[in-house]
Image (cartoon, rainbow, N blue to C red):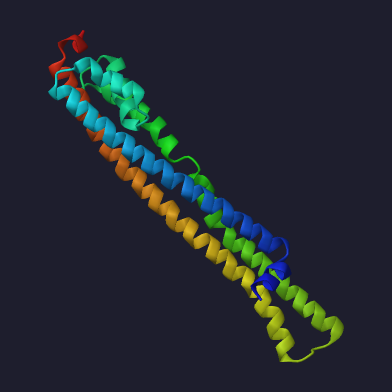
């Protein structure tokens, strides 16, 4: 029966299925990317702590250059500015770098937002089209009994249900990723500030 509903839905159901596949792909890609970022950040923090404890200060920036963590980019940007961590220039550099890293973290999220917005309307369009077709058949072929009308309308309503089924998870994951990015931004800013301040305090050559 499900396959019959999909076939009856025509292009509307095909569009919703395509949106669903895209949404799932974006979610899986972002989950894998976020996991990679968290692992890279944790590894970098451990490496920086170890290098500072061993007084291998030159290794701190070298580890940052080798890391793909947003934390590394922020520390390198501050180091390149040559300013104190508390200075306005260093804060400006960190803000600009943070914007770039946040854009990388937010990549593909607009796709989820778009799918969450349009999927219900695509489903509603399919329902309207199905109801119009059902009443058109009634007008040309006669009533045929309540069961015929109910069958046509039930098939049409499948499009609305499918649209909601596609939109709700997309919206949930969009909100989840947006909140995760906001929390991560606060953590990264604090960690970058602390790491660079510790480096400058223990590495006199960094002040030159």
In the rendered view, would you say 75 is above or below 166?
Answer: above
Q: Residue furthest bottom?
A: 145
In the rendered view, would you say 57 is above or below 192?
Answer: above
Q: Which corner quadrant of the image does residue 189 belong to?
A: top left
Q: Quarter holding the C terminus?
A: top left
Q: Residue furthest top?
A: 208
In the rendered view, would you say 78 is above or below 146?
Answer: above
Residue at the image point whose x is 52% and y is 56% from the top: 116
| Left or right of 142 in this view: 187 | left
- The location of residue 132, given as percent across then percent down, is 75, 74
Tag count in the figure?
0
Near-viewer residue (174 or 22): 22
Q: Is residue 86 visible?
A: no
Q: Which corner quadrant of the image does residue 33 belong to?
A: top left
Q: Quarter holding the N terminus?
A: bottom right
Q: Is residue 140 visible?
A: yes
Near-viewer residue (56 or 192): 56
- The location of residue 53, given as percent across then percent down, is 13, 24
Q: Which corner quadrant of the image does residue 13 belong to?
A: bottom right
- The location of residue 165, given as percent across then percent down, is 53, 65
Residue at the image point whose x is 71% and y is 90% from the top: 146
- The location of residue 188, given as percent across then percent down, is 28, 35
In the rendered view, would you say 104 is above or below 109?
Answer: above
| Left or right of 154 in this view: 41 | left
Residue at the image point whose x is 54% and y is 61% from the top: 166
């Amino acid at each position: 029966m499900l396959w019959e509903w999909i076939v009856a839905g025509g292009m509307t159901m095909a569009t919703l299925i395509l949106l669903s596949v895209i949404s799932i792909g974006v979610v899986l890609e972002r989950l894998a990317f976020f996991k990679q970022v968290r692992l890279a950040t944790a590894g970098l923090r451990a490496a920086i702590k170890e290098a500072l404890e061993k007084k291998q200060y030159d290794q701190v920036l070298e580890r940052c250059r080798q890391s793909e963590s947003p934390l590394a980019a922020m520390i390198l940007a501050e180091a390149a500015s040559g300013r104190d961590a508390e200075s306005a220039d260093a804060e400006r550099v960190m803000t600009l770098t943070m914007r770039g890293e946040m854009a990388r973290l937010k990549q593909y999220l607009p796709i989820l937002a778009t799918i969450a917005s349009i999927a219900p309307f695509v489903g509603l369009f399919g329902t309207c089209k199905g109801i119009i077709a059902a009443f058109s058949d009634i007008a040309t072929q006669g009533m045929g009994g309540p069961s015929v009308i109910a069958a046509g309308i039930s098939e049409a309503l499948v499009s609305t249900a499918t649209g909601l089924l596609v939109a709700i998870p997309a919206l949930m994951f969009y909100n989840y990723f947006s909140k995760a990015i906001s929390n991560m931004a606060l953590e990264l800013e604090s960690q970058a500030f602390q790491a660079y301040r510790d480096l400058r305090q223990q590495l006199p050559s960094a002040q030159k």
